[in-house]
Every structure is written in structure tokens, then in C-alpha cells.
Amino acid sequence: MIGAAVSRTLGSRGLPWVAGLWLVVLALSPLYGDNYIVKIATFVALYGVLALSWNFIGGYAGYPSFATGAFVGLGAYAGAICQNAGVPMIVAWLLAAIIVAGVAAAMGPVILRLRGHYFAIGSISLVEIGSVLASNWSGLTGGGEGLNVRFLPGGPDFIARFFLYAMLVILVAALATTIAVDRGRLGFGLRCIAQNEDAAEMVGVPSTRYKIAAFVLSGVFCGAAGAAYASWVGYIAPADAFSILLTVKVPVMVLLGGAGSVLGPLIGSAALVLLEETVWARFLDYHQAILGAIIVALIFFLPGGLLGLRLRWRS
Amino acid sequence: MSALYAQVLLNGLMLGALYACIAVGFSLVWGVLNVISMMHGSFVILAGYLTCAAFTGAGIHPFAALVPVALLLLLLGYFLQLGLINRVVSQPVLTTLTLTFGLDMILYNLMNVWFEATPRRVTLDLGRLEFGEVVLPLDRAAAMVLALAMTGLLYVILRGSRLGRAIVAVRMDRDAAALMGIRVPRVYAATFGLGAMMAGACGALLALVYPITTNVTGQLLGKAFIVCVIGGLGTVPGALAGGLVLGLVESFGGHWFGPQVAPLLGFALMLVLLAVKPTGLFGQRGYE
Amino acid sequence: MKPLLEVEKLSKHFGGVHAVRDVSFTIGSGEIVGLIGPNGAGKTTLVNLLTGVHRPSGGVVRFEGVDVTAQRPHEAARRGLARTFQIVQPFPRMTVLENVAAGALFAGQAGSRAEAERLAAGYLAAVGLDRESQRLAATLTLPSRKRLELAKSLAMRPKLLLLDEVNAGLNTSEIDGALALIRRIAASGITVVLIEHLMKVVLSLSQRVLVLHHGQLLASGAPEAVMRDPQVVEAYLGARFAARFAGGDAKSEASHG
Ligand SMILES: Nc1ncnc2c1ncn2[C@@H]1O[C@H](COP(=O)(O)OP(=O)(O)O)[C@@H](O)[C@H]1O
Ligand SMILES: [Mg+2]
């Protein structure tokens, strides 16, 4: 695990510095790059948020969640609908985050009773349900046509920077939450749950409550990021917003970097976004196949990454 | 019962037979290998494309194409498992699931490049039977009968053949099976191959009744999930029952609440079942 | 003596298997009670019922006068009802110290992780594991794992400690070490229920013995009285252990006592 290796060499004192440095590199991208670079930096921040979010439930609690796409899609639609109803943009993002957190809290008790493959399927089906709902609830979502979101007025430079810093703010929030969880009671309890859920209960960890907390945390920032994304691109459609691809890509990023750590998700998301961006540009037709090949290669040739995963996944 | 309901019932049964056939291979792989094959939907569509290509390119009748296409997928599945998936088969859920997802991305992409995304299907005008107002198109009826026959064939293979008994033994107790001299990696490969073969057979049949396009691979996979959850994991009768239940639910649901709602009902049923009874409606364990 | 734990007509069946049937007893504060019974008698199931792992099919459990029949395991832990697992259950990829700290943090008195680790070090010293505190729990030997299990439950500051076969799998000298440790635990004021299928261990330590057989409470009382109870001799010893008890176990019993 790259993340674990880095944290070992740096010691836990070094962690905030590395993360902080990384944030500065992203934040300064308008100084050293054009709008394309700024866009990539924004994507890196966006995926950083998603990866850190997944890490709460998938990394710390050890539950193989594929709900990311559902959280993002719900956040995107909630934000877009609020915004189109006249709610100011940033308030709409906050509302989206709250709505997603509420849905995660409501769904959590149902699907967190499942373990292993069943949990994986339960969580992935949330994405599918979201997509079906978005396609069919035309009055609210525009159905299969999708939904236009009012564009932010301003020139391209301003817009590029605005959304970069918006994503970075969400990223900082997710990162700060991760550090707090990692050092606190919740993170410790979640690690206990990941390693042996029965024993965790037996030493007094309220496992159901902690798992729901982790699930809600893994939803809330996705909700905000999804809403910000919708405002950024100005148009959302069911299959893009509730994306199965995204829902699998995010865990892959975390595993690439190292699950259950603070830095792992940041490293993994940056690595995969940059990799994708370089691949995307060259081989448009084979983009997906190459990404797939990268995933396969990761599993077989990066035993420190996927295969060396030191987590327990119940089956 | 009015003719209308008879028609809805009949449609549900035809749909259900296809769902059962799609899900039974997926369920076999999941039950025996403890691996979720994210490639299953793409296998079905690949077979559908091959059937269409054989029909339009060489005029081969889909019923004749079914066997070679299914065998081709059997080989594909066998070697994928032997060469790749076997190496991580005992890894955590997330690893195997991610691997098959990566493989699926490759297959999906290649299919889009080779066949282009335009939907295509085989149109055989076989005519139709009419019972009063109830209409039974014969191509659909043939697809249903063959789907049930293929599902039955898998049952017979698992029950009656040496390979089938080895598969059941490995599922029950892998270590004991290995001690008895069963070569577990080969059995895994054969299991995955059989799963792909069933997907292949379904794909050939699907080409008769629905347009084949890569857009639906995810939906097909979703149906397989749902059927497994309804019927319980890892039994042929379970997959059959689950498939028929799902077909009927979608057919009647679509009739009562509109066709858009139908796919949602399956997922809702699945979530409720997962919450209440994760072993499935008819749940018992053991692949036989 | 005010009862700490009251069990009334407790039952549990799994499908057709009646693992525990109509069991009633009380345990007083400060007692050391032995719970014996051959394999499959329902001892572990009883522990699971008392700690909220299983929901009883019938009956009531009261702890300090409060009805706790429907509690969840973590609630039992926080109430001061700790147990060890017959099959030890450490957090394998945490250090020994962290394992014990988990008990101190989530059920014990620690207010922070730092404090939990400080307290944990003390409990590790008490069970003689202080030298291993930085090892990963998965790498410990079986006797050490049992000690870890004990340290973890002590860190929870229990009022009642249910020890499910802590001596199983240990050799004679290891058992003597464990018994000395349990004696010290009891002397510190913790009520102990010692669950064993080996009589020797229980008889030498317990003030009172409960005998479980086929899920039912067969006898209870002072160790000597229970041993002479004809029902116990017939059902328990007669059926399964007569030969062994008359031979090896009885001798070691004598030498031990
Ligand atoms: N979770 C369970 N499901 C079904 N049967 C069980 C379960 N736990 C225990 N049993 C059955 O209950 C009986 C008592 O078992 P147990 O409490 O483990 O006995 P002991 O600890 O005294 O050896 C046994 O017949 C066992 O098979
Ligand atoms: Mg026991």
C-alpha cells in the first residue's frame, strides 16, 4: 500500500504536511497551468472527495460499498433541482449534502445488516434504483432528457477557478473529517468492526450506530461534490449522474493508494485521474478498455496495492 | 380471468424463463466460486452479437448458432478463470468483484468497437398462435422453451455428470474435495465456463426477441442479481423460481403501474428481501 | 447478598435444537461460580444469551435489578457484563496494546485513546503480557491469546466476568498460571463465572457450582455437595466422564487440592 508506506516513513506527524502540500499544489494550478490543467486539478479534487468518502465505510469499517454513484447522483439531482427552484447555488449544495446524508441514514440500517457480497449488491442496487427513479420521475428530474442547471455567470477563467476552489473547500472538509475520525473513537471503533465485528460489539463498540455513521459520512461529502459537479457542468442525465462506472472506480482509487488511511485515498485518486487523463487523450476509442486493463494489472502486479489489502472483507 | 390477464401472465412467464436462464449461470459462479461475475451481462450480449453476425453474415439459423456460440463462451469463460480469476479467487469480495469489473470494461469496450453500438436483432417470422384474444408469438415461445431447456440441461449436468458432482463437492467443502483428489482450479474453471456457456445460450435466444446492444449489459447483470436474491443463491430450481417471480412481477407491475415502473419493482423487491431474508424466498443452501 | 445477575426460566432453541431450557439461577455480587457441563450442554449458548449475542426464546435476564433480556452485546459490555470467547477473538491486525485499549475505551473508563492505551498497559502487565504489547495480535500463541482475551475483558472494568473455557487447550502448568490469575481477578472484587467442561479447574476455584446438561440446570450448590449429587454423578459423570474422572482427573484433583 503506497499510502501506508508513505505514512510509515513520515510518521503520523508528517501526514498533515503532505496533505497540505498537495492541497497547495492543486490550489495554485491556475498560476502554473491553463484552464485545462485547472480542470484536471478540479477533477483530482472531486475524486479526492469521493475517495475519502468511500474510505469511511470501505476502508475504516471494511464494508465493500458500491454506493458512491448513488450518493453522487442523488447529490447532483438534489442540488440541481434546488438550484432550479431558485435556491442560491451554495445553499443548494449544502441542502444536497443534507439530503444525501438523510437518505444514507435511512438506508443504512437496512443494507448495513448485510455482509460481503450481499452488502456489495445492496449498495450497488442503490445506484441502479437512483438511475431508474431519475429516468422515470420526469416531473421532477426531467426524465431521460436530463436536467439543465443554470450556469454561473462569468468568463471561463473565473468559472474554472470558482469550481476548483469550491471542490477544494469540500476536499478540505472531507480531509479534516477523515483526520478527526482517524484519530478519534469512531475511527478506532470502525477498525475494530473491520477486523472482527462480533468482538467489536463485545468490547462495547456500538457497531450498528458506528457503521451508519460511517455510511452517512461516506455520503455527505459525495452529496455536496455531486451538487457542485452538476452546477459545474450545467447538465445532468440519469445514467451519468448515477454511474456504475464511478461507483466502482472510486474504490479502485482507494485500493490503489491504500484503504483505511488518511493519505491513501488522496494518492490513489490523484494517480488514477492523471493516468486516465493521459490515456483518455491518446486513445479515445479504447479508453474504457485501457482503464479496465489498468484495473486488472493493478490486481495482479501491485500486490502492495490491491492484493496486499490488509482489510477484512466478510464473505 | 380475462384474456388481458392471461396475456400479461403469458408475457411474464416468457420473460421469466429468459431471466432464469440468464441468472442460472451467474448464480452457479457466485455459489461455487464465491465470485460475482460482473462480466455476465456482457457475455450474454457478446453471444447475441455473434448470433446476429452469423445470421446476417452467413445466414446461419439462430437455433443452429446456439450450440457453437455457447461452446465458444464456455471456452472463453474456462480460460479466463484458469488464467486470471483463479489467482485471486479466495481474495476478499472487493478484489474479485473489481477484477471481473475490469475485465468487463475491456470486453464491453471491444464489443463497442467491433460491433458498433447500434442495436440489432434476428427477425424470424415464425408466425403466432392465437387463443381467443391471447397471442403467443412463436419466436418468443421458442425462445422460452429453449431457455427452460438450457436451464434444465444445466441441472442435469450438475446432477448427473462427474463434473457436476465435482462442482457440488467443491461447493460443499473445497478442502475435502481437494483431499479426495479433485483438481479444484480446474473445477473452478469449468464452473466459470459453464456459467459463461449459459450466458452464451441466453444471448443467442435473446437475439430472437430483443435488440442486442451493449447498452443493456448492466441491466442484464442487474436482473441476474435480483433473481439470485429472490430465489436464493446457488441452486438451479432457485434461479428458475426467482426468474419466473421476477418476470411475473415485472409483467404485472408494468401492466398495473406502467412500463417504466417495472424495473424498479425488481430492485425494490430485492432490497426488501435482502433486508428481511437474505437467503432468498426459497432459500436453502447447496448447489444441486 | 444482593443478587448481581438473576436468570429466570431462560430458554433458547435453534430450530428444533433446544440448546437452553428453562434455566433459572442467581449470582451474587463477589461470588466465584463454576458452570460445568459436557460439550454441547448449552454453556456457550447461555453466555451468548446473557450478553445479548442471541435473543432468548423465552425467559428473563436481570442485571443489577434491571431487565436486560433484550440488550445488544455492546450494551452488556458497557453495563459491566464482560465475557471471553471460547474461540478467542482478537482484532488480528492491531497490536496487543490496541486490542486491550479497545476494551478500555469502549466499555471501560478511558476518556481518550491516549488514556486507553495507558490503562491498557497496566492490564497487560497484570496478565503478564507486557512484553508483547507491540506485537500484532494475530502473531500470538494460544496461551498468550487467552491472556489477551482476559486483559481485554479486564480493561472493560466488568462487574461480572463470564470466562468461557479460558483453560481449554492449555497444558497443566499453563492452567495453573491461568487459575492463579483468575483468583487474583476475583480477589479484586469482580464477580466471576467460570465456564468449563473440565471439573478439576472449576472445583478448585468455585464457591458454588451450576451443572448444565442437555440445556437444563441439573444441580447447583457447593462443589462437594454437587459432586455427591447422584443425579450429577449419573448424568454427567456416569454418561461421559466416569471413567476419566475415576482415573486421571480424580488423582490430579487430589494432588491439586
Ligand atoms: N448458532 C447456533 N445455531 C444452531 N445451533 C446451535 C447454535 N449455537 C449452539 N447450537 C447448538 O446448541 C447446543 C449447545 O451448544 P453450546 O452452547 O455451544 O454447548 P457448550 O458450550 O456447552 O459446549 C449444541 O447442540 C449446538 O449444536
Ligand atoms: Mg462452549
Image (cartoon, rainbow, N blue to C red):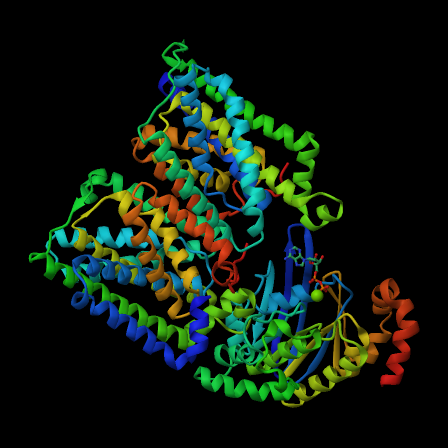
Q: Position of residue A148 (x, y in %)?
A: 15, 46
Q: Which residue in the rendered view is the most extreme toward the left?
A: A154
Snapshot quadrant of residue A161? bottom left
As displayed, is residue A100 above or below residue B235?
below
Lateral position of residue A278 relative to residue A206, left or right: left
Q: Quadrant of residue A41?
A: bottom left
The residue sitting at 46% across, 20% down in the picture is B143
* Residue B104 in sight: yes
Whether residue B13 is visible here, answered yes or no, is no
Image quarter (top left, top right, bottom left or bottom right) of the C terminus of chain A: bottom right
Residue C4 location (% of width, % of height): 60, 79
Q: Residue at x 17, y 54 (%)?
A: A231
In depth, the one of A10 and A213 nearer the eye is: A10
Side of C257 where B156 appears, left or right: left
Q: What residue is rendered at 29% in x and 47% in y?
A: A282
Q: Quadrant of ligand 1?
A: bottom right
- In this view, the residue in front, A270 or A104, is A270
In the rendered view, would you say B252 is above or below C82? above
Examine the rendered structure and indicate whether residue C28 appears above or below residue B277. below
- Quadrant of the image occupied by residue C242: bottom right
Which of the two residues, A87 or B53, is positioned nearer the viewer here? B53
The residue positioned 75% from the left and 44% from the top of the image is B181
